[in-house]
Image (spheres, rainbow, N blue to C red):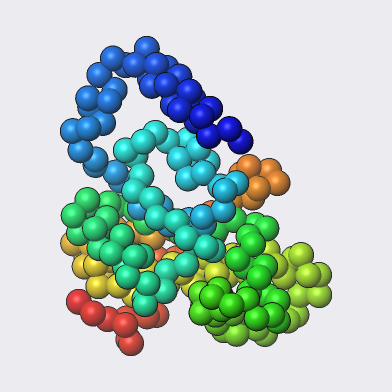
Amino acid sequence: MNIDNIFANNQQWVQNRLELDPNYFKSLSQGQNPEILYIGCADSRVSAEELMGISPGDAFVHRNIANMVPNSDLSAMSVIDYAVVHLKVNHIVVCGHYYCGGVKAAMQQADLGILNPWLRNIRDVFRIHKDELNEIEDEEAKYKRLVELNVQEQCINVIKTAEVQSAYRDRQLTVHGWVFDIHSGHLKDLKINFKKVLEDVMEIYRIV
């Protein structure tokens, strides 16, 4: 990739936008009012806005390796706080993807250095669901199922936060779990039962 081409591409993108709407950037600079907080993987093949078919300003986006939401990650916790409390988003999406390198690495019994503490969060997901996963003999099917279970557990982590519990009480904020299939380009809705998850975790994790 020629870095200089990026600036040429940027100029062309600006021109295209202005041709469609001369006030596009003026409007964009006046603030943001997204409906969605999207938490996804940092994988270079997965572009949040493109896969949802939306424009800049429509979603507040947070990305990291394997779309994790550990409570010890101040970056993720700060993003949730800002999006829910200040931007007043009404939907939070945790979106994983099949053939995720982070999930694949977590399935390996190997010392991966600085990645170990991060990947341990995914290995904890495997531990929680090991009975189901160990019944799957096909390794690719097991890998894809772990991707789905990881999204499910990260949705639960989102629901554990005080900001989300308050926003659900005040304005019925909803949490969604999706998986992006790189082979087909389609999104899969895991149909997370937000109300049931909330009821299940409130005995221990009720904050508000």
Whether 5 is drawn above or below 103: the answer is above
Q: Position of residue 195 (x, y in %)?
A: 37, 68
Which residue lies at the image location 53% right of the left edge and 34% below the top edge?
3
- Residue 178 in view of the camera: no
The quadrant the C terminus occupies is: bottom left
Whether 44 is drawn above or below 163: the answer is above
Q: Position of residue 55 (x, y in %)?
A: 39, 33
Q: Is residue 82 left or right of residue 133?
A: left
Which residue lies at the image location 45% right of the left edge and 56% below the top edge?
63
Residue that sits furthest to the right in the current view: 137
Which residue lies at the image location 22% right of the left edge and 32% below the top edge?
29
Whether 157 is drawn above or below 82: the answer is below
Q: Position of residue 54 (x, y in %)?
A: 42, 35
Instruction: From the viewer's side, name the closer residue of 89 and 115.
Output: 115
- Residue 69 in view of the camera: yes
Residue that sits furthest to the bottom in the current view: 204
Which residue lies at the image location 25% right of the left edge and 19% below the top edge?
23
Q: Quadrant of residue 66?
A: bottom right
Q: Is residue 104 left or right of residue 91?
A: right
Q: Is residue 62 left or right of residue 109?
A: left
The quadrant the N terminus occupies is: top right
